């Protein structure tokens, strides 16, 4: 049993504050991904969970136990590092055996020469060797056990690093961007393997990445982090389709979501980029709001009207099954990007005028300070909802 | 060492380079060759005006026998081996943990401590000989092995060198070791030291050579012949054998430097391998 509960954890290095009041509950056996841009504090949070760094404030519990001040080796967590951090002077087998030797052998039994003659050493060593071999076979590195890390490829090193963490059978796996040093093809393959590993072991995984594809494909839940704050914690589909915050919507999705600024004209209607949009939220007229539209939410319509953007096509990118259309809409500073199915879209050429419609339920509305406005809400209720998610 | 293909250098510059190397090598070798040559010559030939490497009359057996029998040269050598081994082992035992703390741990006063190491690095050891002598007298270790060993155990150079090397080892490796259950001392001995092996070997060679050859401090610290390291022994030998009987003296000197040269030549291959082969990535 290893649920993790993080309560109001803060961390600062001298004057700079890196984590601000991070609170998060992770269920036993869950695959949770910490997603955020470089430098937002993901690794710092992971190191605090592992006990390698001490938080400035707040507390962390693993299982039933508060682990603040508990040494890393007593926390029953294993970590895979971004740089793999293998011991270069030891063979793969020795690398993987070290955590077991430190746990199963007494310090007398570990003595270089004498240890062999201590009672029980031979039996335990044989057992360790068996466990290492079994784990190595499961990861497909059984034939590499006698090599040193310097003689391995990046993908093989990555497997050894996973193996070293796995062989201990920890209650919690922490992974810090384990795939970021691999090439694109291997990354896709390892993504599936790690997911499968999680299914097989059934233990809690906390996985750090700045790659949204990894986060979306592997996780039970994604925690989006920005500047040391958790913005939203939710399953991947919900993070994408129902973001709580403008920054979350902008961070997730490629190409990026289109953001249009405008003013509410009257109840339920807003004007932006020369078009009228139905906005089913209760805000006072004259309020500035932002509408977010995912590129694939657009469809081509015949004429201008409600919920329709009109502009001239700047560029068309053919991606095989999809078309990316860049549209210059008067009154916006960036071109609007639409993703259209190639077979449904008529022949579109640059320079022509195009009308793109959106279903009102696919509009994502944000208030001026970036909070999400939901149809049934009036500004203010969102805050409560966000709190619920985080707790 | 000449490579068959001269790495893109034109012939004249390759010739130049080899000339310079040969001349430098010769300058360094000449005194040694002379020493060996003198050690196999009879007294009459040593001061002859003409120089030849081979003596007309081979006198090596006599010179070497006298060197080995008239003074307790084997005893001096054993003293040297014991003292140098103890110094190196203790130096590494002290310097590695100290360097690890300075390189990788965070504690108040760290920078001040490191500054003090740097200051100690600047001071020549001779400056400290008088205080050390008085200290040795006070605690009563003068004229013992301890007097030869203890003053060198804390080596600022060793701490500095190891610290610089340990700093290049990524923090993640230490983090991984902590998670794997190693204590801080185990991290030093099982992770840091093996990873810094080239630096350790370089330091050990440096330390052994300088202490094997050191004369100044042993001259102050010990009077008993049975404790003397080789250079001091040779000096005592020379005083006893007063006069111009240089043959046995040179034979003794040859015997004294031989272990260093043999050790260096046999370690050389390993040393070069350590510098190039252990790369992390
Ligand atoms: N020991 C330290 N001293 C001072 N600042 C630090 C220290 N460690 C991390 N930081 C700062 O904390 C911030 C977060 O660092 P962290 O390593 O957690 O980022 P990250 O989200 O893991 O980024 P990346 O994706 O690049 O790995 C960074 O701005 C970094 O400069
Ligand atoms: Mg990081």
Image (cartoon, coloured by chain):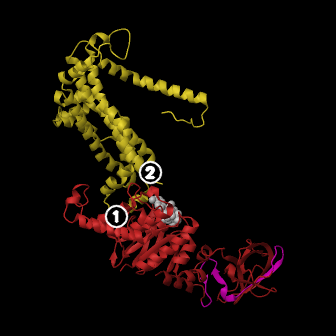
Q: Is residue A166 visible?
A: no
Question: Could you say whether the residue bearing mark 1 is in a helix, strand or loop?
Answer: helix
Which numbered mark, 2 or 1, is in the foreground of this view? 1
Residue toward you, A86 or B214: A86
- Does the segment drawn in magenta span residue A350? yes
Q: Which residue is mark 2?
A: B168
Q: Which residue is mark 1?
A: A97
Q: How many numbered discs, if any? A: 2
Task: Tell me where residue A253 sits by quadrant.
Answer: bottom right
Q: Which residue in the rendered view is the most extreme toward the right?
A: A352
In this rendering, the answer to whether A269 lies above or below A151 is below
Which chain is displayed in yellow in the rendered image? B
Q: What is the quadrant of residue A237 in the picture?
A: bottom right
- Image colour for chain A is red
Determine the chain carrying the residue at label 2: B
Q: Is residue B1 visible?
A: yes
The boundaries of the magenta stretch are: A347-376
Tell me where residue B70 sits by quadrant: top left
Disc 1 within 8 angstroms of ligand 2 (CB):
no
């Amino acid at each position: 049993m290893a649920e993790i509960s993080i309560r109001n954890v803060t961390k600062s290095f001298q004057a700079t504050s890196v984590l601000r009041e991070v609170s998060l509950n992770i269920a036993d056996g869950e695959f949770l991904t910490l997603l955020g841009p470089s430098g937002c504090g993901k690794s710092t949070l992971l190191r605090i969970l592992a006990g390698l760094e001490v938080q400035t404030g707040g507390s962390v519990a693993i299982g039933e136990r508060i682990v603040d001040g508990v040494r890393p080796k007593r926390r029953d967590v294993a970590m895979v590092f971004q740089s793999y951090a293998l011991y270069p002077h030891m063979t793969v087998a020795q690398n993987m055996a070290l955590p077991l030797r430190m746990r199963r052998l007494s310090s007398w039994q570990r003595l270089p020469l004498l240890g062999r003659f201590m009672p029980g050493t031979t039996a335990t060593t044989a057992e360790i060797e068996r466990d290492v071999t079994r784990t190595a076979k499961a990861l497909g590195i059984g034939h590499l056990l006698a090599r040193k890390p310097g003689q391995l490829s990046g993908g093989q090193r990555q497997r050894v690093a996973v193996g070293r963490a796995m062989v201990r059978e920890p209650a919690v796996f922490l992974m810090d961007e384990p795939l970021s040093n691999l090439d694109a093809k291997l990354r896709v393959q390892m993504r599936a393997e790690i997911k499968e590993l999680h299914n097989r072991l059934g233990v809690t995984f906390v996985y750090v990445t700045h790659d949204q594809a990894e986060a979306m494909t592997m996780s039970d839940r994604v925690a989006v982090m920005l500047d040391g704050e958790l913005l939203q914690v939710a399953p991947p589909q919900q993070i994408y389709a129902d973001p709580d915050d403008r920054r979350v919507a902008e961070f997730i999705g490629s190409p990026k979501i289109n953001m249009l600024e405008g003013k509410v004209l009257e109840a339920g209607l807003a004007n932006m980029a020369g078009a009228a949009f139905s906005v089913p939220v209760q805000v006072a007229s004259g309020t500035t709001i932002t509408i977010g539209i995912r590129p694939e939410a657009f469809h081509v319509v015949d004429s201008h009207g409600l919920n329709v953007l009109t502009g001239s096509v700047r560029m068309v990118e053919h991606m095989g099954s999809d078309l990316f259309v860049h549209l210059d809409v008067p009154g916006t500073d960036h071109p609007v990007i639409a993703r259209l199915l190639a077979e449904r879209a008529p022949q579109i050429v640059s320079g022509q005028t195009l009308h793109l419609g959106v279903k009102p339920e696919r509009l994502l509305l944000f208030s001026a300070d970036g909070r999400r406005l939901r149809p049934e809400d009036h500004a203010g209720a969102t805050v409560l909802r966000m709190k619920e998610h985080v707790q | 060492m000449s490579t068959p293909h001269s790495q893109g250098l034109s012939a004249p510059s390759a010739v130049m380079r080899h000339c310079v190397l040969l001349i430098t090598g010769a300058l360094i070798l000449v005194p040694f060759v002379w020493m060996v040559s003198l050690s196999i010559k009879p007294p009459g030939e040593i001061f002859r005006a003409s120089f030849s490497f081979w003596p007309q009359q081979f006198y090596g057996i006599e010179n070497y026998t006298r060197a080995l029998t008239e003074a307790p040269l084997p005893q001096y050598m054993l003293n040297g081996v014991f003292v140098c081994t103890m110094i190196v082992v203790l130096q590494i035992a002290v310097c590695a943990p100290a360097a690890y703390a300075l390189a990788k741990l965070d504690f108040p006063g760290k920078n001040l401590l490191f500054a003090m190491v740097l200051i100690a690095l600047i001071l020549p050891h001779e400056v400290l000989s008088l205080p050390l002598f008085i200290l040795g007298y006070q605690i009563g270790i003068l004229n013992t092995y301890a007097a030869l060993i203890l003053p060198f155990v804390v080596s600022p150079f060793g701490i500095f060198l190891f610290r610089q090397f340990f700093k290049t080892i990524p923090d993640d490796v230490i983090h991984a070791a902590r998670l794997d259950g190693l204590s801080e001392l185990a991290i030093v001995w099982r992770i840091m030291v093996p990873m810094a092996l080239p630096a350790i070997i370089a330091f050990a060679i440096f330390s052994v050579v300088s202490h094997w050859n050191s004369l100044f401090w042993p001259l102050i610290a010990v009077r008993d012949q049975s404790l003397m390291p080789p250079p001091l022994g040779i000096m005592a030998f020379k005083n006893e054998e007063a006069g111009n009987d240089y043959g046995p003296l040179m034979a003794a000197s040859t015997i004294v430097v031989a272990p260093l040269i043999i050790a260096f030549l046999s370690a050389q291959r390993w040393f070069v391998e350590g510098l190039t082969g252990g790369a992390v990535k």
